[in-house]
């Protein structure tokens, strides 16, 4: 009953299982999907992290289960095991290994993060220096208890209860709130930005193809928090450039009469002094 | 990484007694006070954090609206000076506590220190009642009132602590307290007054530092 | 504490406390389950289902544990009921009549002062067609975000506050409009005017409590 | 025991002031006084009320009433003697009840102030487990609501109140259940101390808990739509806007914070100053080391929460503007300060679980703990690093973009010291002679659950993934795996392990096995799907969700009910074995070397007649040359031959 055997057997099991798991994961399409560049990045990141965790987790589980089964005390044997207290090489090896994994995860995540928050990296390579990237479409998201409204400052600053954005163009969301903290979450677009009163939070999206998306509130904001969303008839839509242009025209016509009442476009809106 | 050999002979060790030894008893208030200082430090952190975050973000330009200025610097300085004076007085007299004979002199300085602390509390209350602005007037007003009230309460508690310490000194000067031998008696010795005084000193020095810092922050930044 | 008497007292006290607490606890949670009110449903000749919903908005409801809170009432069988959970037929034309007793407060977001989602995007205030109004004038809104319905309710300019029933001095407007319900489902409706006096942003209390300025619409 | 030793010992372990402020001080009078003073406080607050929703009155009523309750219970009795400078601790005479050796007959001391750390430990255990079942009942209500995608019996506001109460009450439980119960009970026994350093503070820490729970629950009776709408995080400005129930949240939560802080000061001082001769740091049981690591967190972190909630209370009652941007406040402020407390807080939950698991593991592996010093370093490292990761809770809140990579890296680095426990596991069971008794089963389950919880934590630490997963059920699954699967499973293990020493009875083996399998299976079938629904985009704290997710949610709910049922098995086992089983448990049923198992059951009020001398480490299994862990001088507790 050699030491080597007790390491090789579970080692082989681990190799087989983890390879199988990782292969399955490579064929898995994880949410949020591939509607935008950022969403795609998140899906891939999810895959990578699932593979890392599967490999690590399976290793621990397999070895632990194997040891628990093989080294169980025989019935009637009340004796003790060998007094092993530690092993310098094993312990330092363990630390080094986990540090390497963690460093990889951190580096990968940091690079991926840059690709999600810097406008030049959100757009596809071909678009790096295009004018559209330097002047993205600005959509202001205004959270209030309990509805999202959207302003389009580059189109006369009209406001709309529904959101439409064009595909294949960099969109910059300026998210703010009129009262409490909301969380603007367009799940399939792969963007989630908190709407905070007195704060302008910025997020970027580059949609790859026309699609419909839902918007939910991800930060508890009171009674109708769960209903503060654009779903069903109120779905958000990614439109082709031309369809977006015509939608803007219609919206300006329909919501135009309100414009004279709206405050001048600003990054944050402070409510009138609090009414107690 | 083998942990230290567990089977050491116990011959070197002083065998345990029927009660905890006076040395252990004396260390309890010191350690406890250091932890109390840590907890109090983190009680104070949010006030300063709030001050600097609100000052830097200055939302709606309402951190210090027009007409909101720090109240009388003189009174604030007097309050702080009283606290510092009291603490300085005690810190001079505490090291001389060792001998039973100096107990009575400690009592005298203790009462003076108490009066100074009470004076500080009074000054702070006067200050808070003549602010010139209300707690509703922006971020600075809120921080000023909240921090001053909190600090005043702490100073009041410190005064109570000093009262108890001074009375203890007086009590011991009248009836000295016997120290028990843990090897023979299972009745614990009382906490020695030197330990109590030292822990008072630790905490009061912390409060002095906190007071000085908040004085700078609230009146000059 | 050694005497048997005291032990018994403690046991009895403890038991009583536990029982009372449990009873209170359960009943409290059950009391939150609120009944729904069904309006009169008529089927018109064209086969188009129609329903009438009669509501009133009060500056202060005058009863319940929150007598000072603003509230909606619904008329059931000729009497006013304190309920904001209603049953409406699916795919029906709903005619809403609101007796508006409350004073002008003004909207947080001016954008919501436009009439949207009703038939013809119009409401009738005492018979006058209104498409949108100055955002400082509404007292409340009647909004169903899921259906895109948003109707600002014009506030009484100079009424004796608070506008309640049984107060001969105060006036009210009659606001009427119609909207179509969609398929079956559970909708919520709410008011967007920060009308909760005494709460931060006027947005607490009645604005965050089902039964006052919020409610459910069960479309069946 | 000799008479002098008895009296002396007890006068330490169980002494209390003979001066009563007034005639009779027990729970009943305390309650009456508490209510009366509470009403006075409410009246006072109503005088300085500036809004018309009465927050100042309610807050002041809670605070004054609590002080009244504590005074009525007798916590103020010694203030006057102390102010007069009397050396209280030797002057007081022992309470008659405490003078008897602990026995089930004089249980009434569990309903008052007790200075015996063993009594307080039991008080904590029973009280906190009671809260655990109340909050668990709420979890069942939550799952009932989620059976239908459009929401169940309770309207939106009440569902949020349910979730908030469940979350916050479970926070109370998780903060205290191991530290306060087993820490208070066993730390002095494990380090060879006759008493706690600050027994009165310890009692105060306990009596703050029922106060906190009652105050928190009083919030559901405040007006229609009671409770508080913010969830357990209580974000301002929503918390400033919320109804009166929020005041219960503020006071209740700060009380738990204060309780944790003073309990921590007490435990740390005990461990630092009152270790028996020979109990060197390298011989300290790993559970005591866990207490050292965690108590540093729970001394330093909750004060931040207490102040923060006080500021929210000011905003609510006197309209200060800490959190209102329009008045010169900031909505960031609350998030930053809350999570600065909040992240150390979650390690306050989990480090004690490490301690329990690593303490029990060697006893049933019959081997020394593998990598003792690495384990200590790991726990201390987690405690230290937990101060530098809090911003990972607010990645989407608009924190400075430059900060995010730093906090992502810091968060991922914390998994290095955390992962050490798995090396301890593998090394300890390597070539061991494992006895699969009930505690060992639960320890194994703990490691499995915590592995999943830890790995999913790495997902959340990655900002791009966090964008998708934050605020959804993935997060809920993650912290239920770490807190329920980690801490609560180690609580199960600890009950099965220490019950014979706590009560002198063994827990029923068959019921225990049934509990283990139901708990382990149904816990995982309940919470594994959480990751799926979270990944598919179901937000937390929301009674409505996409109809496509109904099947998964129904599956979760059904399994959640079964998991709740298996907790009832545990409860039944405890009550049955404690109250109805006559047969006494052996003194050291697991044949453990640890010091507490060398004591008689029930443990005398003063623990050790003579403080023992520690001559060996607690984990010397299989070491033929190892001495018994301690030398007891003659005439003390019998040492079972092992």
Image (cartoon, grey):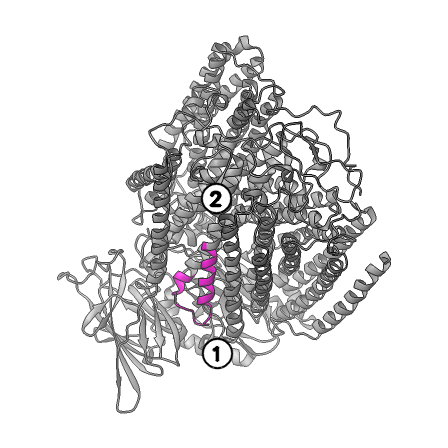
Residue carrying label 2: D256
Residue A247 bears which disc, if any? 1
Counting from the top left corner in percent of width and height, residue D98 is at: 47, 32
Seen at 77% across and 29% down, the residue is: B9
Q: Decide if residue B140 is in sight here.
A: no
**Up-down relation of residue C29 to residue D109 (above or below):** below
Q: Secondary structure at mark 2?
A: helix
User: Pointer 2: residues within 10 angstroms few (<14), some, or many (20+)?
Assistant: many
Residue D301 or residue D79, whichever sits in front: D79
Mark 1 vs mark 2: give the one in front: 2
- Give the magenta part as a residue range: D134-159
Q: Position of residue B113 (x, y in %)?
A: 47, 18
Mark linked to residue D513: none
Q: Nearer the viewer, residue B110 or D165?
A: D165
Residue D602 seen by the camera: yes
Dot 1 falls on a residue whose secondary structure is helix
Chain of the residue under the numbered disc 2 shown in the image? D
Magenta-drawn stretch, dominant element (helix, strand or loop): helix
Q: Quadrant of the C terminus of chain C?
A: bottom left
Q: Is residue B75 magenta?
A: no
Asked whether, in this view, residue D145 is left or right of residue C206, the answer is right
Is residue D151 located in the magenta-colored stretch of the structure? yes
Circles 1, 2 touching at the beta carbon (< 8 Å)? no
């Amino acid at each position: 009953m050699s030491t080597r055997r007790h390491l090789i057997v579970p080692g082989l099991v681990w190799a087989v299982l983890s390879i199988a798991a990782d292969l399955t994961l490579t064929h898995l399409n994880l949410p949020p999907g591939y509607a935008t560049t950022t969403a795609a990045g998140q899906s891939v990141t999810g895959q990578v992290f699932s593979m890392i965790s599967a490999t690590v987790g399976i290793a621990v589980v397999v070895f632990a289960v194997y040891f628990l089964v093989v080294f169980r005390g025989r019935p009637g044997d009340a004796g003790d095991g060998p007094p092993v207290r530690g092993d310098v090489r094993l312990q330092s090896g363990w630390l080094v290994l986990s540090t390497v994994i963690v460093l990889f995860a951190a580096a990968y995540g940091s690079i991926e993060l840059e690709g999600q928050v810097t406008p030049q990296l959100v757009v596809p390579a071909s678009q790096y220096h295009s004018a559209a990237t330097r002047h993205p479409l600005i959509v202001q998201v205004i959270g209030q208890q309990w509805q999202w409204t959207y302003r389009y400052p580059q189109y006369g600053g009209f406001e709309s209860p529904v959101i439409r954005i064009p595909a294949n163009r960099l969109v910059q969301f300026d998210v703010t709130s009129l009262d409490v903290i909301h969380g603007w979450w367009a799940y399939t677009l792969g963007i989630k930005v908190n709407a905070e009163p007195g704060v302008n939070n910025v997020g970027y999206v580059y949609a790859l193809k026309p699609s419909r998306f839902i918007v939910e509130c991800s930060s508890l904001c009171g009674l109708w928090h769960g209903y503060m969303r654009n779903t069903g008839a109120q779905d958000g839509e990614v439109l082709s450039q031309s369809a977006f242009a015509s939608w803007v025209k219609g919206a300006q016509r329909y919501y135009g009469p309100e414009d004279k009442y709206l405050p001048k476009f600003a990054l944050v809106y402070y409510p009138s002094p609090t009414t107690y | 990484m083998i942990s230290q050999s567990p089977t050491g002979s116990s011959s070197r060790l002083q065998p345990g007694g029927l009660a905890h030894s006076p040395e252990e008893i004396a260390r309890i208030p010191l350690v406890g006070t250091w932890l109390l200082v840590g907890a109090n430090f983190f009680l104070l952190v949010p006030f300063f954090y709030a001050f600097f975050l609100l000052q830097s973000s200055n939302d709606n330009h309402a951190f210090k609206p027009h007409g909101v200025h720090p109240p009388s610097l003189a009174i604030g300085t007097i309050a702080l000076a009283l606290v510092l004076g009291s603490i300085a007085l005690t810190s001079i007299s505490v090291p001389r506590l060792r001998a039973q004979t100096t107990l009575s002199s400690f009592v005298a300085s203790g009462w003076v220190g108490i009066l100074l602390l009470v004076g500080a509390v009074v000054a702070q209350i006067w200050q808070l009642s003549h602010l010139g602005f209300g707690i509703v007037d922006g971020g600075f007003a809120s921080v000023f009132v909240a921090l001053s009230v909190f600090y005043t309460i702490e100073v009041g508690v410190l005064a109570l602590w000093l009262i108890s310490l001074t009375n203890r000194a007086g009590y011991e000067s009248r009836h000295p307290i016997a120290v028990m031998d843990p090897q023979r008696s299972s009745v614990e010795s009382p906490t020695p007054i030197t330990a109590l005084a030292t822990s008072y000193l630790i905490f009061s020095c912390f409060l002095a530092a906190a007071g000085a810092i908040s004085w700078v922050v609230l009146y000059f930044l | 504490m050694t005497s048997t008497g005291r032990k018994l007292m403690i046991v009895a006290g403890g038991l009583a406390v536990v029982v009372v607490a449990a009873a209170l606890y359960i009943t409290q949670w059950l009391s939150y389950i609120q009944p729904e009110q069904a309006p009169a449903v008529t089927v018109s000749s064209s086969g188009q289902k129609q329903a009438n919903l009669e509501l009133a908005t009060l500056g202060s409801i005058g009863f319940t544990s929150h007598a000072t809170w603003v509230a909606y009432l619904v008329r059931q069988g000729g009497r006013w009921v304190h309920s904001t959970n209603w049953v409406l037929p699916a795919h029906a034309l709903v005619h809403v009549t609101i007796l508006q007793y409350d004073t002008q407060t003004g909207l947080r977001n001016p954008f919501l002062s436009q009439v949207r989602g009703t038939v013809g995007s119009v409401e009738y205030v005492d018979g006058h067609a209104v498409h949108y109004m100055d955002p400082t004038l509404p007292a409340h809104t009647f909004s169903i975000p899921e259906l895109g319905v948003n109707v600002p309710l014009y506030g009484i300019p100079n009424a004796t506050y608070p506008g309640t029933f049984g107060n001969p001095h105060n006036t009210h407007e009659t606001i009427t409009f119609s909207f179509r319900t969609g398929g079956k489902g559970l909708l919520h409706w709410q008011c967007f005017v920060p009308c909760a006096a005494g709460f931060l942003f006027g947005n607490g209390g009645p604005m965050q409590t089902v039964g006052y300025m919020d409610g459910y619409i069960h479309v069946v | 025991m000799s008479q002098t030793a008895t009296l002396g010992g007890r006068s330490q372990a169980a002494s209390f002031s003979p001066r009563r402020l007034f005639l009779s001080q027990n729970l009943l009078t305390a309650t009456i006084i508490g209510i009366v003073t509470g009403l006075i406080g409410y009246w006072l607050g109503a005088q300085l009320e500036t809004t018309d929703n009465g927050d100042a009155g309610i807050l002041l009523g809670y605070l004054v009433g609590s002080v009244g309750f504590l005074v009525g219970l007798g916590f103020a009795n010694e203030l006057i003697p102390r102010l007069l400078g009397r050396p209280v601790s030797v002057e007081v005479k022992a309470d008659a009840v405490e003078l008897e050796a602990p026995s089930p007959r004089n249980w009434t001391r569990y309903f008052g102030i007790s200075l015996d750390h063993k009594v307080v430990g039991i008080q904590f255990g029973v009280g906190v487990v009671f809260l655990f079942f109340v909050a668990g009942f709420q979890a069942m209500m939550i799952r009932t609501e989620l059976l239908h995608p459009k929401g169940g019996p309770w309207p939106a506001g009440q569902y949020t109140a349910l979730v908030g109460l469940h979350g916050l009450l479970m926070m109370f439980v998780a903060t205290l259940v191991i530290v306060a119960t087993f820490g208070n009970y066993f730390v002095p026994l494990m380090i060879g101390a006759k008493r706690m350093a600050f027994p009165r503070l310890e009692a105060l820490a306990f009596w703050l808990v029922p106060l906190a729970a009652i105050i928190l629950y009083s919030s559901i009776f405040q007006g229609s739509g009671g409770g508080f709408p913010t969830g357990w995080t209580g974000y301002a400005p929503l918390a400033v806007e919320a109804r009166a129930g929020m005041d219960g949240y503020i006071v209740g939560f700060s009380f738990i914070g204060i309780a944790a802080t003073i309990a921590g000061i007490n435990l740390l001082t005990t461990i630092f100053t009152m270790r028996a001769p020979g109990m060197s740091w390298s011989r300290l049981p790993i559970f005591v080391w866990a207490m050292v690591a965690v108590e540093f967190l729970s001394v330093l972190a909750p004060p931040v929460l207490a102040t923060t909630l006080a500021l929210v209370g000011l905003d609510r009652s006197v309209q200060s503007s800490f959190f209102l941007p329009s008045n010169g406040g900031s909505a960031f402020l609350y998030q930053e300060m809350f999570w600065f407390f909040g992240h150390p807080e979650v390690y306050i939950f989990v480090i004690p679980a490490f301690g329990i698991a690593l303490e029990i593991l060697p006893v049933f592996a019959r081997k020394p703990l593998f990598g003792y010093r690495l384990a200590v370093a790991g726990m201390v490292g987690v405690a230290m690093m937990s101060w530098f990761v809090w911003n990972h809770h607010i990645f989407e809140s608009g924190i400075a973009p430059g900060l995010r990579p730093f906090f992502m890296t810091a968060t991922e680095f914390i998994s290095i010291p955390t992962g050490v426990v798995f090396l301890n596991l593998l090394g300890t069971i390597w070539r061991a002679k494992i006895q699969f008794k009930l505690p060992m089963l639960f320890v194994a389950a703990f490691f499995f659950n915590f592995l999943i919880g830890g790995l999913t934590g790495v997902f959340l630490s990655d900002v791009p993934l966090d964008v998708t997963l934050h605020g959804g059920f993935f997060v809920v699954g993650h912290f239920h795996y770490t807190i329920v699967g980690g801490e609560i499973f180690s609580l199960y293990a600890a009950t099965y392990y220490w019950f014979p020493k706590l009560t002198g009875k063994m827990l029923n083996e068959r019921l225990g096995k049934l509990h283990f399998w139901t708990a382990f299976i149904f816990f995982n079938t309940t919470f594994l799907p959480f990751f799926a629904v979270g990944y598919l985009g179901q937000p937390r704290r929301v009674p409505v969700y996409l109809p496509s997710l109904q099947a998964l949610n129904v599956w979760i709910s059904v399994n959640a009910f079964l998991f709740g049922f298996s907790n009832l098995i545990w409860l039944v086992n405890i009550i049955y074995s404690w109250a109805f089983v006559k047969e006494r448990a052996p003194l050291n049923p697991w044949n453990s070397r640890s010091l507490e198992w060398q004591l008689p059951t029930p443990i005398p009020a003063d623990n050790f007649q003579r403080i023992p001398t520690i001559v060996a480490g607690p984990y010397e299994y299989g070491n033929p040359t190892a001495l018994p862990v301690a030398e007891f001088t003659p005439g003390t507790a019998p040492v079972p031959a092992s």
